[in-house]
Image: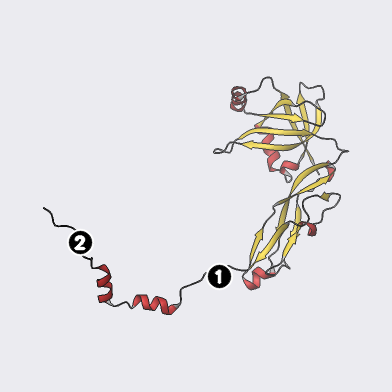
């Protein structure tokens, strides 16, 4: 997997006020942590970080994180969480994890579905994707960009489970019995029998009038 260089700087102070000022200046507040390490508050330029999100690997990209003002100025890291504004979708905060290239880590890898199932093509079935990513354990250098599955041979009623997925140099640790994709039969909309609709349409005018004619109890009282 390719690595991407990202510059960062240590930041002093925390809180909403400090974070707002950083974002107004074009920076994203974040934190970097690792096993046996204290977390450190950092900030990255939005201009530098935005291209990282458009790499093939997205959140699983390995970063050469260069931290200005830190003793260990260059570390390897991955993105663990990105927090977005609920309405504007601006990036509010980023969590980075310091990693070792010689120790295995656990990451979520997207599943990419290719092909058109035979059950969809010939029988009008519907392909449903249940899992869009699976959990994988491997060395950082072996993190796959995605796991591709071909669904062309699936008929109506067929499905693929996690146990059917394969990836090199990594272990899939999601539940092997979990369904990833399935082809279901088309939904049948039950219609009223034609004779019932015909009877309703042929209702006699006098019967309809009787239904609409008010009873003695429902007639309004005369004004006094």
Q: How is the image coloured?
A: secondary structure
- The reply to whether residue 150 is in sight is no
Q: Residue at x 72, y 41 (%)?
A: 59
Left or right position of 17 against 94: left
Report crowding for label 2: few under 14, some 14 to 19, many 20 or more residues within 10 A (C-alpha). Answer: few
Front position in the image: 84 or 49 = 84
Mark 1, Cα crowd under 10 Å, few <14 / some 14-19 / many 20+, is few
Image depth: mark 1 or mark 2 in front: 2
Question: Is residue 192 left or right of 41 when viewed as pictured?
Answer: left
User: Where is residue 85, by image quadrant?
Assistant: top right
Task: State left or right for residue 148 relative to residue 168.
Answer: left
Where does residue 185 sit, x and y in percent of width and height? 63, 68
Q: SS for tag 2?
A: loop
Pinpoint residue 144: horizontal percent, then vertical percent.
Answer: 79, 48
Vertical arrangement, residue 207 with respect to residue 168, above or below: below
Q: x%, y% of residue 38?
A: 78, 25
Residue furthest toward the bottom? 195
For image coordinates 71% across by 60% down, the residue present is 114
Q: Nearer the viewer, residue 87 or 52?
A: 87
Q: Position of residue 27 (x, y in %)?
A: 64, 28
Q: Secondary structure at mark 1?
A: loop
To which residue does mark 1 refer?
Answer: 188
Q: Which residue is denoted by mark 2 in the rendering?
A: 219
């Amino acid at each position: 997997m390719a690595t991407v260089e990202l510059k960062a700087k240590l930041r002093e102070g925390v809180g909403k006020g400090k974070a707002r000022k950083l974002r107004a200046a074009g920076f994203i507040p974040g934190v970097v942590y690792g096993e046996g390490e204290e977390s450190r508050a950092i900030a990255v330029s939005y201009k530098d970080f935005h291209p990282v999100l458009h790499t093939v690997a997205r959140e699983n990209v390995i970063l050469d994180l260069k931290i200005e003002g830190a003793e260990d100025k260059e570390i390897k890291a991955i993105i663990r969480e990105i927090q977005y504004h609920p309405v504007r979708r601006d990036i509010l905060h980023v969590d980075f994890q310091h990693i070792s290239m010689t120790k295995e880590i656990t990451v979520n890898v997207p599943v990419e579905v290719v092909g058109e199932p035979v059950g969809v093509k010939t029988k009008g079935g519907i392909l449903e994707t249940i899992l869009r990513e699976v959990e994988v354990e491997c060395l950082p250098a072996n993190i796959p960009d995605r796991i591709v599955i071909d669904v062309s041979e699936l008929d109506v009623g067929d499905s693929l489970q996690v146990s059917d997925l394969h990836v090199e140099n990594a272990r899939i640790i999601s539940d092997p019995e979990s369904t990833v994709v399935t082809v279901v039969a088309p939904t049948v909309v039950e219609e009223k029998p034609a004779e019932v609709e015909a009877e309703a349409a042929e209702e006699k005018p006098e019967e309809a009038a009787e239904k609409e004619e008010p009873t003695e109890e429902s007639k309004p009282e005369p004004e006094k």
